[in-house]
């Protein structure tokens, strides 16, 4: 029994040392770099190039300032939303609409709405004609 405990402890120490050596103490840093590359914020031009047409869209907010829209989009991206910032001219000014798009055919609107409500975001379901 004593030999098994010593063997297990030695094996665990070796595995931890190998992992620390491989990650070089930068595991979270590498993970954050990966997440930054996997952006889910798209623009109108990117949206037009996509092959997949969503069956539903939720509007979260609209801003006069692009930076405010981008700030909200980044917050939504952190909770794994596919965010579209669309620009529209209204009278003599531009507004930037922050919208959530369906990611793929398996992405259900109900589960997205539950996540939004859990994180205290209000939304508006858009009709196909409003998208």
Image (spheres, rainbow, N blue to C red):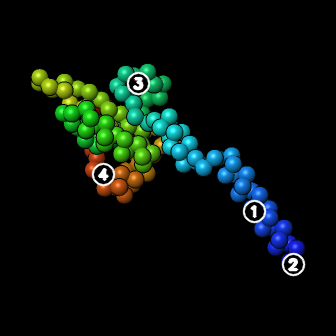
Name the element at disc 2. Answer: loop
Q: CA distance from mark 1 to mark 4?
A: 44 Å
State the residue position of label 3: 46
Q: Quadrant of residue 98?
A: top left
The mark closer to the camera, 1 or 3, is: 1
Name which residue lies at 11% across and 23% down: 92
Which residue does the numbered mark 4 point to in the structure image? Answer: 121
Residue holding disc 1: 12
Q: Position of residue 84 (x, y in %)?
A: 35, 33
Image quadrant where residue 117 sits: bottom left
Q: Residues within 10 Å of mark 2 (few under 14, many from 20)?
A: few
Could you tell me which secondary element the residue under label 4 belongs to? Answer: loop
Tell me how far mark 3 sits from mark 4, CA to CA.
Answer: 25 Å
Nearest the eye: 102 or 116: 116
Q: Is residue 110 visible?
A: no
In this figure, which residue is indicated by the disc labeled 2?
1
- Is disc 1 placed on a helix, strand or loop? helix
Q: CA distance from mark 1 to mark 3?
A: 48 Å
Q: Is residue 39 above or below residue 45?
A: below
User: Mark 2 to mark 4: distance in Å?
Assistant: 56 Å
Residue 79: x and y, percent?
A: 42, 48
Nearest to viewer (mark 2 / mark 3): 2
Q: Residue at x 50, y 34 (%)?
A: 37
């Amino acid at each position: 029994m004593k030999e098994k405990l010593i063997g297990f402890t030695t094996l665990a120490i070796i595995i931890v040392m190998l992992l620390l050596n491989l990650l070089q103490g930068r595991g979270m840093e590498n993970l954050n770099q990966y997440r930054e590359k996997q952006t889910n914020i798209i623009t109108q031009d990117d949206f037009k190039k996509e092959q997949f047409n969503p069956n539903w869209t939720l509007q979260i907010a609209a801003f006069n300032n692009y930076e405010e829209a981008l700030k909200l989009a980044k917050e939504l991206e952190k909770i794994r939303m596919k965010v579209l910032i669309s620009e529209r001219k209204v009278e003599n000014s531009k507004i930037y609409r922050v919208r959530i798009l369906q990611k793929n055919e398996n992405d259900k609107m109900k589960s997205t709405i539950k996540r939004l409500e859990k994180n205290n975001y209000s939304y508006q379901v858009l009709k196909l004609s409003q998208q």
